Image (cartoon, coloured by chain):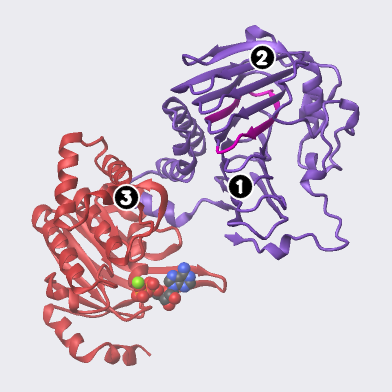
Chain colours: A red, B purple
Amino acid sequence: MSKLEIKNLHVSVNTDQGPKQILRGVDLTISSGETHAVMGPNGSGKSTLAYSVAGHPKYEITDGEILLDGENVLEMSVDERARAGLFLAMQYPVEVPGVSVSNFLRTAKTAISGEAPALREWVGDLKTAMKNLRMDSDFTERNVNEGFSGGEKKRHEILQLELLKPRIAILDETDSGLDVDALKIVSEGVNRAKANTDLGVLLITHYTRILRYIQPDFVHVFVAGKVAEQGGPELAERLEAEGYDRYLKASA
Amino acid sequence: MAQHGIQEHSHGAGVPIQTRNERPRSTSIEDFAEVSKLQEIWRYLPIDKLKGLTQSVIGEISEDSVEIKLAEGVTASWVETTKAKVGSAGLPEDRIAAIAWTNASKTLVIDVPKELEQSQPSFVVIKPNSDAATAAHVLINVGTHAKTTIVLDHAGLGVLGENVEIVLGDESTLNFVTIQDWDKGSTHVSTQFAKLGRNSNLRHTVVSLGGDLVRVTPAVELSSPGAEINMYGVYLAESGNYFEHRPYVDHIAENCKSNVAYKGALQGVGAHTVWVGDVLIRETAVGTDSYELNRNLLLTAGARADSVPNLEIETGKIEGAGHASASGRFDDEQLFYLQARGLNETEAKKLVVRGFLSEIIQKIEIDEIEQRLIGAIELELEKVGV
Ligand SMILES: Nc1ncnc2c1ncn2[C@@H]1O[C@H](COP(=O)(O)OP(=O)(O)O)[C@@H](O)[C@H]1O
Ligand SMILES: [Mg+2]
């Protein structure tokens, strides 16, 4: 069992006009096996939350704490967080020219597990995971995210999720830019990871569509840098019907 | 990526551009002015690091400081530099090259007989093992329809003024690699000339890894139709290294192709690289296809990369001509992405640098050289880690 606790998190980002406060007291707790949907309008700070947990250097934590099984995450470097079992599927995965997917995945797997994976087993796992995500086998020879379509980028993120087997994953708008077929494939991948590794998921999304394929246990409405309301799956249905207007007016 | 318009490069009235073909060519030292930073060709050079290479009289490389390991069928011999064949690929365009030419009484001639197809690489390793200024002259002759790989390697301590001539017969193919992997305290000025026969194909790769001052100026004359040149360069410069590469492609004949791509990674205070890429497309060079590129990755603050592409086009009847040049820092987003997948900072940087240079490294196609380069990158990046 793992538990990620985000307590009273305040985060600012440095801009040309000076520091800008984005997160204003976020409280969230995600345990193994649970799926939490974080839903909110554009600009409400969802990606900032994701990046802050992963340790992106651009974001400064001004108050609050993040704990993983009681360990202080904020004291860990980005790679230590990943090795501790945190995973962020990025909204905009980054190109790494000249580095093949196969080299990248093997290097990442080696880094996460502290030793090179046994070759035969690794090749088998990779093949299976790619097949499940309907990815061509020659995909591994391409350079990381270079010239990938939006759908390929997201599948590649989920491929990493399945292979690296984190304890807690944050998925930042993994659904955006996907057609319904790709959305189903990606959702199946997340559900497989949940079933196989008892993964805890923080699913960031703007729309309710993906929640038809990945069942959330909890829904948190995110507005202006904090959680404005939380509830069960029924809250998502209400958002679908009413949109975010109600919350935006309240926060204005 | 800038694609050059032809108009931009036609020579308008009254603008005093010294075009590349106006440089004097001679083997006599007196035909050239003393080395001075006032001349464009020396403007970046730390002249104090030239050691004795500017003196009119310098020593000559001894035969036993050259290790020669040839593939079957390829031969080597030392001949008098005054022999007629020497000078057939080109003549010096600067004083240091003329000094090296004049002081090398013997030339190492590597002969690849016509029609020999030899996939095994041949190696020539120059190790002067001395800090006295020394001259060397190498001539590589590739016969008609021959095809092979030759590596010219420079290692250890040396202060070397060198001329390398490469002559490709019609329809021949040569994969040539020159490696500058000198110890600290070394200086190397290598002037290289290549002349390509009809439909011949030269891959010329420069690998610079070590030396206080390394200057490689490969000039390629495309004077027979249908010839193709690929000039690649890969370099890793750290504090104390000054590397200058000035590839030059002279398009004279019709339907020739040239592609120039140099990539370097720099780190540490004072690491300095210079790349000046000249391409001249003469009026006669109808149907030319040409592209040149230089990219530099600055791994730390305090390193400096100068990058200057020059493209002169004297005919409008070409397939294409373009250039690109850029120098940049590590991409923080790339590093973050890799670190978020568990790689520590050093591992992430290694992967990024290897990726950045891989485009060129892959072109070498000699396993042991590729491995050596990857090893050098690993070593270099371990230093960034601390
Ligand atoms: N690097 C940055 N520089 C300036 N403003 C930023 C930066 N990153 C985020 N912001 C601002 O912070 C707010 C929240 O952004 P973000 O976390 O990306 O929101 P969301 O993911 O919910 O759309 C936005 O107003 C955005 O413009
Ligand atoms: Mg976002």
Stretch of the chain drawn in magenta:
B174-199
Residue B251 vs residue A115, the one in the foreground: B251
Image quadrant where one finds the N terminus of chain B: bottom right
Residue A235, image quadrant? bottom left
| Position of residue A91 in the picture relative to residue B19 (left or right) | left
Task: Determine contact: label 3, label 1, CB under 8 Å.
Answer: no
Residue A190, image quadrant? bottom left
Badge 2 amino acid = Pro
Question: Are the residues under marks 1 and 2 on the same chain?
Answer: yes
| Position of residue A223 in the picture relative to residue B310 (left or right) | left
Q: Nearer the viewer, mark 3 or mark 2?
A: 2
The answer to whether residue A138 of the structure is visible from this angle is yes
Question: Are the residues under marks 3 and 2 on the same chain?
Answer: yes
Name the chain letter of the residue that bears numbered label 2. Answer: B
Q: Which residue is denoted by mark 2 in the rendering?
A: B128
Q: Position of residue A163 (x, y in %)?
A: 20, 49
Q: Nearer the viewer, mark 1 or mark 2?
A: 2
Q: Position of residue B314 (x, y in %)?
A: 73, 55
Q: CA distance from mark 3 to mark 1?
A: 26 Å
Q: Which residue is denoted by mark 1 in the rendering?
A: B301
Q: Earlier in the sequence, mark 3 or mark 2?
A: 2
- Badge 3 marks a residue whose secondary structure is loop
The answer to whether residue A45 of the structure is visible from this angle is no
Question: Are the residues under marks 3 and 1 on the same chain?
Answer: yes
| Ligand 1 within 8 Å, label 2 CB | no
Split into quadrants, the picture shows ligand 1 in the one at bottom left
Name the chain letter of the residue that bears numbered label 3. Answer: B
Q: Which residue is denoted by mark 3 in the rendering?
A: B341
Q: Position of residue A193 (x, y in %)?
A: 14, 56
Q: CA distance from mark 3 to mark 2?
A: 46 Å
Residue A93, image quadrant? bottom left
Badge 1 amino acid = Ala
